[in-house]
Amino acid sequence: MSRLAFHPTSLAGLMVVKRMPITDERGYLERLFCAGDFASQKIQLSVQQANRTVTMRKGTVRGMHFQYPPHMEAKLVSCLRGKVFDVAVDLRRSSPTFLGWHAEELSSDNHKSLLIPAGFAHGLQTLEDSCELLYFHSASYTADAEGGIHPSDPKVGVKWPLPISEMSVRDRSHPALTGDFTGLTL
């Protein structure tokens, strides 16, 4: 029996993955990833790297990050503590939802993860203090392939739920998209 339920979003390939914990008087066990469950949905996610972030202050924005070809990656993002507004932006040139974005509230209580395909930018805003996230990546990080768009890019128009309290110098310096940005080719 699968302990994961897959729910498509309005952006092709972007999925909400609902974890179904097994609970008893001790607490619970929940599956975060299972290659067999993903394969049953015709989703190939070969995990090559796992990262954990801890963000201390409510309102902090991280992102919007992506990797350029040939180092693009899919990500499975889960919130283990706290609550975040998790955002994915479709940067795929040939996609009918090019530059569309979807946000999902991920929390330690709602047991949701966001499966973000290659060719998307990803970012988040913390909705509580002390948030901890776990990321599974389909490719190892390659510094020379790193890309980013400014979290307040008007061309994308993400509506952050809180005023931005903190952002790294790196994320603040990501440029807005220009008219000659034609997207990423998978």
Image: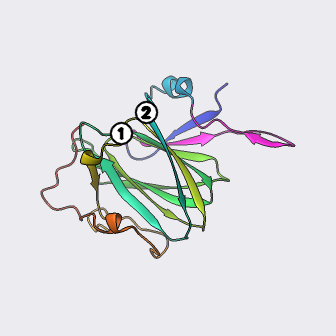
* Residue 119 to residue 79: above or below: above
Q: Is residue 118 left or right of residue 126?
A: left
Residue 117 pos. (x, y %): 38, 40
Residue in the foreground of this view, choosing between 102 and 130:
130
Q: Residue at x 57, y 34 (%)?
A: 33
Q: Are marks 1 and 2 in contact (CB under 8 Å)?
A: yes
Residue pushed farthest left? 180
Q: Is residue 24 left or right of residue 180?
A: right
Q: Residue at x 33, y 69 (%)?
A: 172
Q: Amino acid at mark 1?
A: Glu
| Number of the front mark, 1 or 2 | 2
| Residue 184 in which image quadrant | top left
Residue 147 pos. (x, y %): 27, 52
The total of numbered circles placed on residues is 2
Q: Find the magenta span and give its range.
A: 12-33
Residue topped by disc 1: 73
Q: Amino acid at mark 2?
A: Gln
Q: Is residue 18 left or right of residue 86?
A: right
* Residue 175 to residue 166: above or below: above
Residue topped by disc 2: 48
Residue pushed farthest right? 25
Q: Check if residue 89 falls in the magenta segment.
A: no
Residue 114 pos. (x, y %): 50, 46
Judged from the image, the secondary structure of the residue bearing numbered disc 1 is loop
Disc on the earlier residue, 1 or 2: 2
Q: Residue at x 24, y 47 (%)?
A: 144
Q: Which quadrant does the C terminus fall into?
A: top left
| Residue 185 in which image quadrant | top left
Residue 44 pos. (x, y %): 43, 27
| Residue 142 in which image quadrant | top left
